[in-house]
Image: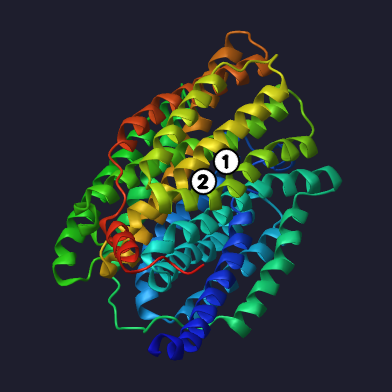
Amino acid sequence: MPETQNHSPNTELQRRNMQVIYLLLAATFVVFLNETIMSVALTPLMNDLRVDSNTVQWLSTAFMLTMAVVIPITGFLLQRLSTRQVFMTAMILFSLGTLLAIVSPGFELLLIARIVQACGTAMMMPLLMTTILQLVPASSRGRTMGNISIVISVAPAIGPTIAGVILSLGSWRWMFGVVLPIALAMLAIGYRWVRNVNEPTKAPLDVVSVILSALGFSGLVYGLSQLGHSGAQNSTGALVISLSVGALALTGFVFRQLVLQRRDDALLDLRTFRNSSFTATVIMMLVAMMALFGTIILLPIYLQKVLHVENLWVGLMLLPGGLIMGLSAPIVGRLFDKYGPRPLIVPGTILVTAVLWMLSLVDANTSPYYVLVMHMLLSLGLGLTFTPLFTAGLAALEPKLYSHGSAIVGTVQQVAGAAGTALFIAVMSSQASVLVASGSTEEVATAAGIRLAFMLGAILFTANIVIGFFIKKPAEDAATSEAEEGVAAPIH
């Protein structure tokens, strides 16, 4: 009888919780749609703004790098502010940055606009992840994380497609003109419906940690970007200096967190890495995101500059892969709940590695349909990988470390994406410039540079196959499953 009496209040609470989650999912979809919208536009932007590939890629790299710096601060904001306050701040910043991008007269203001957009985007993912970990039972997280994977994969996939359509019709400014009214609509809906699911507490913000993380991440990524300026003595000096500053700053950041976490004041609590499953998933996520964003940047450049495919068709060719990743996510989530992460992650990493090796064979005469099939297979492999990694890594932590764990995962994602973008572009540019100087055509030289970049990605991803065997299903999930089986069959 008590179960019957409590059914209605519990159902109402669950309904309200899912309403919050779906609103956050929708808003996250909007801001993540914008993250990759620039990939197809890079070549037109190079022509319109008269900048080279190493410069224009900062419109994507700076976006991800800003997210990497802001995401750890979001851990502080999630403790200090309410869910509603964080949501409103994120969407206002994103909308403001989008408006700035529309009116930007040149590269400099456009870069600033992307940084402002990134500040808003950075707050959404930790907010969503932490809210889900607070509201969703452990036994259902795989399915819920599958829904998150739809946002993470389909939104970035649709971005290039929308950009391709818009660029075939008019100016690149309209890419932001399409996003702005959607963002404003989500802001209005969120103002009306988002409710608080947390209790704000007094939390300190260590400014020194923020500065060290910003110097560390930006130093490493900027250093990687300088690899593309081969032969220039000043760029070699910049590479050494920036990598050195980045390494020293990150070392200082780690030591400071180790000290601050003793009194629970760390910007990022590194005690999360005491959990071997979390550590393994973070390493795999780093490599996977480098490969994903490096590929997202290179494929449009290859299709446009080497195979001379029109912008509209470039966007459309990248769509099937994103849809495969997104549509497979709920299925992967259910399989995770049933079988755990390893049976999904190992085949996924093997498939991604094989595809990257196949992409390292492209040349100036490769069929666009070959690229289409490879991108679809790559997306399938990443789809098998991302949801289990998110779920297994974060759910393995104790609840008090959820916000720090989600902030670390988000930071690693964005740093890896920025580093992958900078590294792949740098490798491509460096190899291409050498071949052009020796007499090769631009198409042949660019194709050779892209081959080398994909080969590097394949070598990096091979390590993920080995690490995948060490990912285990969190003990909490296993215990919950056993308890449910011992008491009664779940009601569907």
Residue labelled with disc 2: 61
Where residue 16 appears, as percent x and y from the top left, is 53, 81
Front one among 219 and 482 = 482
Q: Quadrant of the N terminus?
A: bottom left
Residue sitting at x 41%, y 85%: 3
Res 187 → quadrant? bottom right
Q: Position of residue 402 (x, y in %)?
A: 32, 65
Say which of 176 and 147 sits in front.
Answer: 147
Residue 38 visible (yes or no) = no
In the picture, residue 88 is in which quadrant?
Answer: bottom right
Using a 10 Å C-alpha cutoff, classify the residue at mark 2 as few (fewer than 14 neighbours), some (14 to 19) or many (20 or more).
many
SS for tag 1? loop
Name the residue tied to disc 1. Answer: 57
Front residue of this view, candidates 478 and 58: 478
Relative side of 351 to 275, left or right? right
Q: Is residue 83 above or below residue 375?
A: below
From mark 2 to mark 1, how far is it between C-alphas?
A: 6 Å
The residue lying furthest to the right in this view is: 169
Which quarter of the picture shows residue 445? top right
**Residue 344: image x %, image y %?**
43, 40
Question: Please, is residue 476 above or below residue 457 in the view?
Answer: below
Kindly check if marks 2 and 1 are in contact, taking CB atoms under 8 A apart as contact: yes
